[in-house]
Image (cartoon, rainbow, N blue to C red):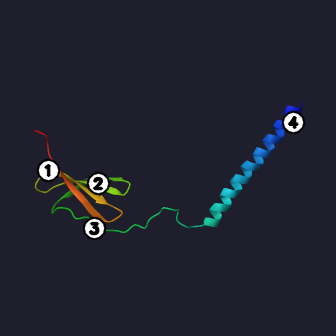
Amino acid sequence: MQPLKAFVILMGVLILMGFGGIIGVIAERLVAGGRAPTGATVFQAGAIALPKGAKVVETVAAGDRLVLRIARLEGGEALVVYDLATGRTLGVVALAESP
């Protein structure tokens, strides 16, 4: 009977600690209010220079990079790699069919 009593007391303590943790998280979030989470950055819109007559076919974002697949007016496709953090074009990769 003694081990059962110790187990019940231990479980009661663990339940109280769990409730204390939940109340602590709720209080922390209430105090934080509407502040932005840490690591959030302000978005600054910028223009991406594309060749004249080019059409954006596909976009893929990964981390702070944006890759645009474009169809050129004169034919063919290219990838434009854009850095979202600095707002500048990192490079253009022309896509060609293999012979």
* Cβ–Cβ under 8 Å for marks 2 and 4: no
Circle on res. 76: 1
Circle on res. 47: 3
Q: Quadrant of residue 64?
A: bottom left
The residue tagged 2 is 67
Question: Residue 46: image x %, image y %?
Answer: 31, 68
Label 1, label 4: how far apart the Cα atoms are: 77 Å
* Cβ–Cβ under 8 Å for marks 3 and 1: no
Label 3, label 2: how far apart the Cα atoms are: 14 Å
Does dot 4 land on a helix, a strand or a loop? helix
User: Given this view, does label 1 or label 2 mark the residue nearer the observer?
Assistant: 2
Type of residue at label 3? Ala
Between 37 and 72, the residue placed more toward the observer is 37
Type of residue at label 4? Lys
For disc 1, the neighbor class at 10 Å (few under 14, some 14 to 19, many from 20) is few
For disc 3, the neighbor class at 10 Å (few under 14, some 14 to 19, many from 20) is few
Question: Residue 60: image x %, image y %?
Answer: 32, 52
Q: Going by the image, does 34 lie left or right of 67?
A: right
Extreme residue toward the top, this view: 1
Type of residue at label 2? Val
Circle on res. 5: 4
> Which circle's residue, 4 or 3, is located before the other in the chain?
4
Residue at horizontal 48%, vertical 61%?
Answer: 39
Say above or below: 5 vs 52.
above
Type of residue at label 1? Gly
> Which circle's residue, 1 or 4, is located before the other in the chain?
4
For disc 4, the neighbor class at 10 Å (few under 14, some 14 to 19, many from 20) is few
Say above or below: 78 vs 50.
above
* Cβ–Cβ under 8 Å for marks 1 and 4: no
Between 7 and 71, the residue placed more toward the observer is 7
